[in-house]
Each structure stands twice: as C-alpha cells, then as structure tokens.
Amino acid sequence: MRKSIALFIALLISGYLPTVAQEGQPTAQGPFAQLIIRGVTLINGNGAPPQGPVDIVVENNRISRVQVVGYPGVAIDPGRRPKLKAGGRELDATGMYLMPGFVDMHGHIGGKAQGAEPDYVFRLWMAHGVTTVREPSGRGVDFTLDLKKKSARNEIVAPRIFAYTGFGQGSKAPISTPEQAREWVRENARKGADGVKFFGAPPEIMAAALDENKKLGLRSACHHAQLNVARWNVLHSARAGLTSMEHWYGLPEALFEDRTVQDYPLDYNYNNEQHRFEEAGKLWKQAAKPYTEHWNKVMDELLALDFTLDPTLNIYEASRDLHRARRAEWHEKYTLPSLWDFYQPSKISHGSYWHYWGTEQEVAWKENYELWMTFVNEYKNRGGRVTTGSDSGFIFQLYGFAYIREMELLREAGFHPLEIIKAATLNGAEALGIADQIGTVTEGKLADFVIVEENPLQNLKVLYGTGAIKLTEDNEVVRVGGVRYTIKDGIIYDAKALLREVETMVDAEKQRLDYQIRQPGIKQ
Ligand SMILES: [Zn+2]
C-alpha cells in the first residue's frame, strides 16, 4: 500500500498521470468515436425544466444528438433509442441526472503559500463537476497558459482553463502611466491570455487598460480593492469596459449617497486583516437601501452595460459563521496540511483575519449578507447575468466543495435551483464568450457534463463530494449523491475515484509530516 502511494506521488511529481484515459483505467476513459449516455433526466443550463428519459450521443468530444426516449414510469421502447455503432461505448445512467459541465468563474489554481499544486486542485474541481475554470490571476501567465494547453490536449486531469492575468503581473517596473498600462495589456494579449484581472488602480490607469483590453476583444474581471475604490468604483469600471466584477467590493461604494469613503475607524490600517474584514462587514449598511432611487439607478446602469456579477458569496462565509467554515466535514480527508496551516489565524496570511473574531463581527456580517444577496437576486430578476465563482484556497474554503456551497448561497439569495444551474453553466459560458461551445447540452457543443444519481434541484448537497445525509426506510443513516461522473471533452472521469486520489495525496502528506488537523489555539 505504502509503495503504491509512493509510486502515485512520484508519478504526480514527474508530471506523468494516468490521464488520457484508456479503456479499463479506473479514473478516466475516452474519448470515444461514439459515446451514448442512456436514460438520464436532463437538467439543462438554459432554465428549462428537467426532462427525461433522454439519451445523449457524443462523437469524440462533441454532442451529436440529444434525444427524448420515453416518459417517466413507462418502459423505454428500445426501437426509439439511438443505436450504438461498432466501437462505440454506452454509459448506462438510467435514473441519473445530467447537467452541462460547471463553470467556476473564480478559480485560483492553488498557490505556493497554500502548498496547493494543480494536480490536487484540478482533481477537487473535476470531482465536483467543474469542467471550466477562469483563473483570475495566479502564478503568472506562463504558468497558467502551460496548464491551459495541457488541459486542452487532455494530457492532464483538469478543467478547461481561461487565463485572466493579474494586471501588471510580470512587469519589470510598476505601471504608472496610461501608456505603460496599454503596453502591458497588449503584451498580455500577445502572450495568449484570455483576459485581465484587476485589483484597482488610479483612474487614468484603469481607464487606459480597460479601453485597450476591450479594443483587443479580451474580457476582464476586477476585485475593487479598498485602496483605490474612493475614486474608482464598480460603476466607473463598467462604463470603461470591465466585463465582470468579483466579490462585492466597489459596489456599495457605487451605491453611496451620503459619503464618498466608507466609515473607517480612525485607527484603521488596511494591512491589519481584522480591520479590513471587520469593517467590510459594515459596508453594505452604509450604501443606499434596497429599492431606493439611487440603488435602482446603479443597478439599471450596470444592466444596460451587460455587466456580469461574480459574487463569490462563499468565500466570506466564515465571516458570518467561522465555526461552520473551519469544522466543515471535508477538511479531515481532503484538506492538505499546508492549506490547513495557511487558513490559521495570522497577521500575515491573506484572509486569516481571526485575531479576535466573535459574535459582534458575525452578526454584522449576517446583516451584510442580507443586503448583498438582495442586490444579487434582484439583478438576476431584472435580467442581469450572475455567475458562480468560488475563490477557494482562502478562508477555510476548499476547492470544489466551496463551489457547491456557492450554489447553496445563491439559493439562500433567492435563486430557484434551475436559476442556479443556469448561473453555474450558461451564464459562465456567456461571461467567458464561449456560449457557442459550452454551457448547455445542445447538439454541436462540447461534451462537458455532470452526472449525479440524486436530483440536485431537490437538494444541492447531493453535489458535495461527501454527499448528503439520508435516513433510509430501515432507519439506517446513509450518504447519497456526490457527483458520479464528470465528463469533459467526451472523456468520462469517475468523480469518486478522483476524490480517492486526493485522499491518497493528503494521507501521504500527513504521514510524511506526522500531521493531524487541529482547531485554532488547541495544542493537542
Ligand atoms: Zn480571488
């Protein structure tokens, strides 16, 4: 057993993976000249109600046919089903639910500080049905583009990757003039990046960079960090051509009516993470109230600009319930020691702001969430595009698992579960500009799917790798669900086998370090 773990780790490190899948391999199989997925209930990404039974035919990596083959509760007439060709492969998914592959619009591919390497991160995403990821700034454009190419060739187990380079990343000198900003944006496009991730900058720099990026036909994301938001908020960005906003910073500032900066305590220091996150929790209250004239005006202008909200609700959840986030049941099995260490209270690690985080802070954040969610839900109701992004690897949020939590929080915000599936699929595809390729189960599109045994509309928790808790007729407690298969480019990945591989990686690290997960401040 030890030996096989060591071999597995060695293979991971050497970059060789049992990836492009061949028949008989446990984790991944395909692509096939023809693949027929039989008997599913289709939950499409376009807001349509579920429909089944359906057979889906894939040729190599493209959907060639989506065929309704019967009625619920009635035996299927085999004569009505698509025929398997010689050399084709059937996947019996009778009674299962199939959705388009999920798009994570805010997926950092690990990080050195977290000790989370791509093989670990990618498996956790794929195990939760994430087949496309937008990386909003990572370890540099070359690093991300290398992985993007390998993923496109299916040489590694990984979602499709869209690289949005951190603005200024790789630049030898700080960008201080509009012309330097334009030149950096052009260079980023030449390298092959898909877009730019901004964190805010002086107005003239933001205006120049966004203008140049738009001219080149690239897309953009921005986390409007507090340092520049007094002069340049979400509305300025949207007008200048930003295509999507991350998180929520910069939006309350656009909604201010009786101030121009947030009500900072006078001893505030941005480099003190508790100051930063504690005061952020009081920010929505300082903005215009929901449905007031100013609130409506800002929303309507963003809607008119076809602007995308990528709220990443989950990444702040520990702010309103630290206990929940740090005791999530998946940490023991799937969180790497280095990642667990990174999450611990610290004056240095980003997002580890638990210097003294108590009842007062959590209650403030609960109120903050209500106001934020009201905006997000109403934006969706008025026709605005809201996407699903996780931002995992910080604040006790684990890759893949946090993506499902994001769906649950959209539900809490008021989304119908079908609106959530749309946010997770078609809306992401639209925001990336690839809705002609992915985002719905439609003939001609790429074969990216999520298949699960239980109905995710009835309970989104069945999408967690750890499943949902259920009591059987016989009074036995069981787990149901967990994604069964994730299909990308026509390759079938056994989602549960991917999770087992992650577990093996985590076990090996714990053995190497003689490590055990402990809660903050508890010595033994
Ligand atoms: Zn982020």
Image (tube, helix red, strand yellow):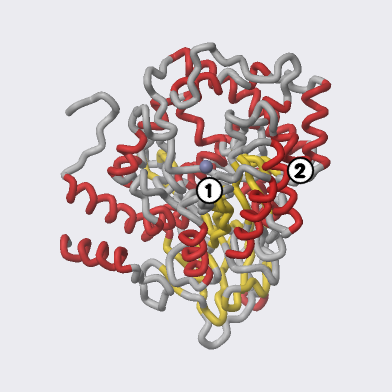
* Residue 356 in sight: yes
Residue 43 circle label? none
Label 2 CB sits under 8 Å from any ligand 1 atom? no
Q: Nearer the viewer, residue 469 or 340?
A: 340
Query: Please, what is the three-letter code of the amino acid marked with disc 2?
Result: Ala
Residue 173 circle label? 1
Query: Which residue corresponds to the image point at 47% horizontal and 62% vertical from the top-left?
Result: 158
Q: Nearer the viewer, residue 279 or 387?
A: 279
Which percent across, then down, holds residue 192? 60, 64
The quadrant of the image that shows the C terminus is top left
Q: In this view, does 135 lie to the left or right of 55?
A: left
Q: Is residue 229 left or right of residue 345?
A: right
The quadrant of the image that shows the N terminus is bottom left
Query: Please, what is the three-letter code of the amino acid marked with disc 1?
Result: Ala
**Residue that lies at the very extreme toward the bottom in this rendered image:** 86
Q: In this view, does 361 lie above or below 145?
A: above
Query: Which residue corresponds to the image point at 51% horizontal and 75% vertical from the top-left?
Result: 90
Query: Which residue corresponds to the image point at 26% horizontal and 65% vertical from the top-left?
Result: 8
Residue 240 circle label? 2
Judged from the image, the secondary structure of the residue bearing numbered disc 1 is loop
- How many labels were placed on the picture? 2
Which percent across, then down, holds residue 12? 31, 64
Spatial CA span between label 2 and label 1? 24 Å
Which percent across, then down, holds residue 116? 36, 50
Q: Is residue 351 left or right of residue 336?
A: right
